[in-house]
Amino acid sequence: MNIKENCKILKLSYIFKNYEEEIKEAKQTKKDVGIFLDDLLEKEINQRKDNGIKKRLRYAKFPIKKYLKDFDRKLYNSEFIKEFKELETLDFIEKKKI
């Protein structure tokens, strides 16, 4: 078997699409094999995380996508601004607060 076939079997889509370029770059920069492999696997993991987020957003079927950065905080009073700050830190998850 070759790299492409193994990537298909293991469902490593990032590596499947990018391994040739990554190998070329590693050779040019004389990157250590261990570091190269670690970086390649990290990129695979990051792509999976990004794909998972996109998939969950699609399944949620939100009518409008709104992010915290999209809100103009000048329009809200100081009490709500505190809420924005708490949402940004995600501390409410650890505290198990709603």
Image (tube, rainbow, N blue to C red):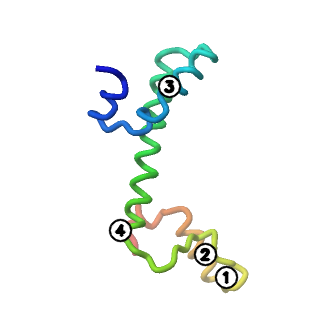
Query: In front of the other: label 2 or label 4?
Result: 4
Q: Residue 25, how many percent across, how many down? A: 59, 22
- Mark 4 vs mark 1, CA separation in Å: 34 Å
**Residue identified by numbered label 3:** 20
Counting labels gives 4
Query: For the residue carrying disc 3, how many other residues have a C-alpha within 10 Å: few (<14), some (14-19), or many (20+)?
Result: few
Q: Which mark is residue 82?
A: 2
Left or right: where 65 falls relative to 81: left
Query: Residue 59 or 39: which is nearer the viewer?
Result: 59
Q: Residue 80, how many percent across, how many down? A: 60, 81
Determine whether label 4 and label 1 are within 8 Å by CB: no
Left or right: where 65 falls relative to 12: right
Q: Which mark is residue 78?
A: 1
Q: Which mark is residue 41?
A: none
Q: Which residue does the image show at 43% across and 76% down from the upper left? A: 62
Query: Mark 4 or mark 3, which is nearer the start of the sequence?
Result: 3
Determine whether label 2 and label 4 are within 8 Å by CB: no
- Mark 3 vs mark 4, CA separation in Å: 33 Å
Q: Secondary structure at mark 2?
A: helix
The quadrant of the picture occupied by the N terminus is top left
**Residue identified by numbered label 4:** 59
Position of residue 26 relative to residue 86, above or below, is: above
Query: In front of the other: label 3 or label 1?
Result: 3
Query: In front of the other: label 2 or label 3?
Result: 3
